[in-house]
Image (cartoon, rainbow, N blue to C red):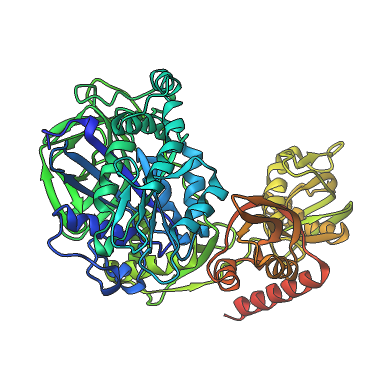
């Protein structure tokens, strides 16, 4: 590949709604460019992109996968094409986040019959946030009721007239017309006249030529438009029919002529400075994915931003500040792994068996210390408690979950210290199901997923006086300790909760630490339902002791019991976690969604419009939305999505609290009987 300069490298990510045709387009391009000797098809399991067992079973793309190919048109310069195929299913949006972060441009795939769907809008919003140059590829033109012009009109309504056609199908759908090169085609000439203004705005020289009445050549038009694309002022629209191999040459030519190279759009380091993409610059590469390959082992997937990464070389991990040895460099095309001696800017490569390097690490040349900004992934919105089906599998479960989390950074695994459950969280329930299937196949451990327990808390709403005298005599030295205390509410976040209000010597000062320990124990098991107590101040103001029988354990028991006594008198309440959610939908389901949220004790905070979609913002108790991912999918036919974040703890309504308290008492009794 050394014969292809960085200026002729194009690094593109394919994004769009699930089923829009991304994978079919990738398969058609790989077949055309000779990477695959047959035309793969996701529908029958022969796709070069959707090749994992999970993808074949679920018939959707699940992982971001890199592909590398070379296009050598007759009479033209060769194009080096690095492509990233991404899933469109909402549960795997984290894969889109990582892929768009390391791409120079995006191809937004839109099916002409389905139109712009929620997954397309989500991907578009991501591209906008990154300022990522992009083109739109319209597929599905060979389907019944497909209308290319109507699709383009919808795109322009949503995203403006900066979206303009560069290739379009003939009326009989038997060929594709290239606007820049077509002769004696009225529609092409009409579009070309509109493109002239967009191209001219990028160059004073071109503006002057247009003002003088001169016609721009196809090359001048392409050069001007490419500059506009790089600045995201122009978004070309291409028509393709991948299975018929129609429009692929025109698309490849458009990618080459219109989309930026790594030289046009250098990456930014963590300080916001450009990374030099030149081949002779200091090497910089960023890790954005990790794969556990059954044959090679751990594969670290990285994007080269600048310089030259060489096989069998030593590099510096700037994130971990350690040297790292790079052995073999792989180019990945589905299951195929080709080795290469070196990689340059724009290349997506796999590195095997690195010792310390993990996701988000930056590798750079020895003597350099350049770090790329870390990728930020979406927060989980669904959680399950995980338990092994078979006793004795606890160790295997821990290792298996660790590997699952390594594969997908949007999956988080943690042990909840309050509920003592092992929790797996992710972007959606399908994602978690796939992860569990993968863990079963690789780690030979089966699990049971259940709804997690809610981490309720307790607090007080008024002042209360507590008292307890602990006196025990059973021969020999006895136990004695008496404590008087006052309990009252304090604001969340106040750290100083224990007040020494003792006057005189009613309680010797050396017993204060024991009293405080007793209070901590009492606050870990509240008087309402046994949940931790928060936002509560305790003032110990009196008590009594015995010269012989008083001890630390006596005062610890006394303060714990006094706290429980005082809390019962201070109007205690149960608290529950409240989540703020943003539900995005096409607008057809507003009544169903708001009604459902009200049924879940939700409080609607507002509604707004965003990129042609309707957004509902609400606060909902966490206990009501553990299964909301699947419920929303069912309610909206897969067209709705949501984001969620913890907001605060709030008082549980009395009728709901009664059920929680009764359930807690029942569980406590069952534990005591065991």
**Whether residue 135 is visible:** yes
**In the displayed structure, does residue 647 sit left or right of residue 122?**
right
| Residue 55, position as x, y percentages in the image | 32, 67
Q: Residue at x 76, y 59 (%)?
A: 603
Return the residue nearer the eye: 422 or 109: 109
Q: Is residue 626 above or below residue 410?
A: below
Q: Residue at x 75, y 75 (%)?
A: 659
| Residue 345, position as x, y percentages in the image | 25, 32
Q: Quadrant of residue 135?
A: top left
Q: Is residue 431 above or below residue 460?
A: below
Q: Quadrant of residue 579?
A: bottom right
Return the residue nearer the eye: 558 or 71: 71
**In the displayed structure, does residue 160 sit left or right of residue 164?**
right
Q: Is residue 297 above or below residue 135?
A: below
Q: Quadrant of residue 344?
A: top left
**Image quadrant where one finds the N terminus:** top left
**Image quadrant where one finds the C terminus:** bottom right
**Whether residue 409 is visible:** no
| Residue 433, position as x, y percentages in the image | 42, 69
**In the displayed structure, does residue 419 sit left or right of residue 445?**
right
Q: Residue at x 52, y 53 (%)?
A: 153
């Amino acid at each position: 590949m050394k014969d292809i300069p960085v200026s002729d490298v194009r690094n593109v990510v394919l994004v769009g709604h699930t089923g829009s045709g991304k994978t079919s387009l990738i398969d058609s391009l790989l077949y055309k460019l000779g990477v695959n000797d047959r035309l793969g098809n996701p529908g029958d399991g022969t796709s070069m992109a959707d090749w994992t067992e999970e993808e074949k079973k679920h018939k959707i793309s699940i992982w971001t996968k890199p592909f590398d190919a070379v296009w050598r048109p007759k009479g033209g310069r060769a194009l080096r094409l690095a492509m990233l195929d991404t899933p469109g299913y909402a549960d795997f949006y984290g894969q889109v986040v990582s892929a768009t972060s390391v791409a120079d441009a995006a191809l937004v795939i839109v099916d002409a019959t389905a139109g712009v769907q929620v997954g397309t809008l989500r991907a578009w919003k991501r591209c906008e946030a990154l300022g990522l140059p992009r083109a739109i590829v319209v597929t599905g033109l060979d389907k019944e009721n497909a209308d290319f012009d109507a699709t383009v009109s919808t795109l322009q309504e949503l995203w403006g007239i900066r979206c303009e056609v560069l290739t379009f199908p003939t009326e009989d759908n038997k060929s594709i017309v290239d606007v820049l090169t077509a002769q004696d085609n009225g529609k092409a000439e009409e579009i070309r006249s509109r493109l002239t203004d967009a191209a001219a705005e990028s160059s004073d020289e071109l503006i002057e030529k247009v003002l003088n009445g001169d016609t721009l050549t196809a090359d001048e038009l392409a050069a001007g438009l490419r500059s506009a694309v790089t600045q995201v002022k122009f978004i070309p629209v291409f028509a393709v029919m991948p299975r018929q191999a129609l429009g692929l040459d025109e698309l490849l030519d458009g990618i080459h002529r219109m989309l930026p190279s790594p030289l046009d759009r250098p990456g930014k380091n963590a300080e916001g400075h450009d990374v030099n993409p030149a081949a002779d610059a200091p090497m910089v590469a960023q890790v954005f994915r990790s794969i556990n390959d059954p044959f090679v082992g751990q594969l670290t997937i990285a994007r080269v931003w600048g310089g030259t990464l060489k096989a069998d070389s030593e590099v510096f991990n700037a994130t971990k500040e350690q040297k790292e040895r790079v052995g073999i460099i792989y180019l990945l095309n589905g299951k195929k792994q080709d080795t290469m001696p070196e990689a340059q800017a724009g290349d997506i490569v796999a590195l095997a068996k690195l010792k310390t390097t993990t996701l988000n690490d930056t590798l750079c040349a020895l003597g350099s210390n350049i770090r790329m900004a870390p990728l930020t992934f979406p927060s989980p919105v669904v959680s399950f408690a995980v338990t092994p089906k078979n006793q004795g599998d606890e160790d295997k479960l821990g290792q298996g979950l660790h590997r699952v989390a390594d594969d997908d950074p949007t999956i988080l695994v943690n042990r909840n210290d309050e509920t003592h459950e092992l929790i797996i969280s992710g972007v959606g329930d399908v994602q978690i199901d796939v992860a569990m299937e993968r863990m079963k196949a690789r780690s030979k451990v089966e699990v049971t997923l259940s709804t997690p327990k809610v981490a309720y808390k307790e607090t007080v709403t008024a002042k209360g006086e507590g008292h307890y005298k602990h006196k025990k005599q059973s021969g020999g030295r006895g136990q004695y300790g008496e404590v008087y205390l006052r309990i009252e509410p304090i604001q969340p976040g106040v750290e100083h909760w224990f007040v020494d209000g003792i006057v005189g010597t009613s309680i010797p000062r050396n017993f204060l630490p024991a009293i405080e320990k007793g209070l901590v124990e009492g606050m870990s098991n509240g008087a309402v339902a046994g949940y931790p107590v928060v936002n509560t101040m305790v003032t110990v103001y009196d008590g009594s002791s015995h010269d012989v029988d008083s001890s630390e354990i006596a005062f610890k028991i006394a303060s714990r019991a006094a706290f429980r006594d005082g809390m019962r008198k201070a109007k205690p309440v149960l608290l529950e976690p409240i989540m703020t959610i943003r539900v995005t939908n096409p607008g057809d389901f507003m009544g169903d969604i708001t009604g459902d949220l009200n049924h879940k004790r939700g409080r609607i905070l507002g509604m707004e419009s965003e990129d042609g979609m309707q957004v509902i913002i609400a606060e909902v108790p966490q206990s009501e939305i553990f299964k909301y991912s699947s419920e929303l999918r069912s309610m909206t036919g897969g067209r709705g999505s949501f984001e969620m974040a913890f907001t605060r703890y709030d008082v549980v309504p009395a009728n709901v609290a009664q059920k929680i308290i009764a359930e807690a008492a029942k569980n406590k009794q069952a534990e005591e009987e065991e």
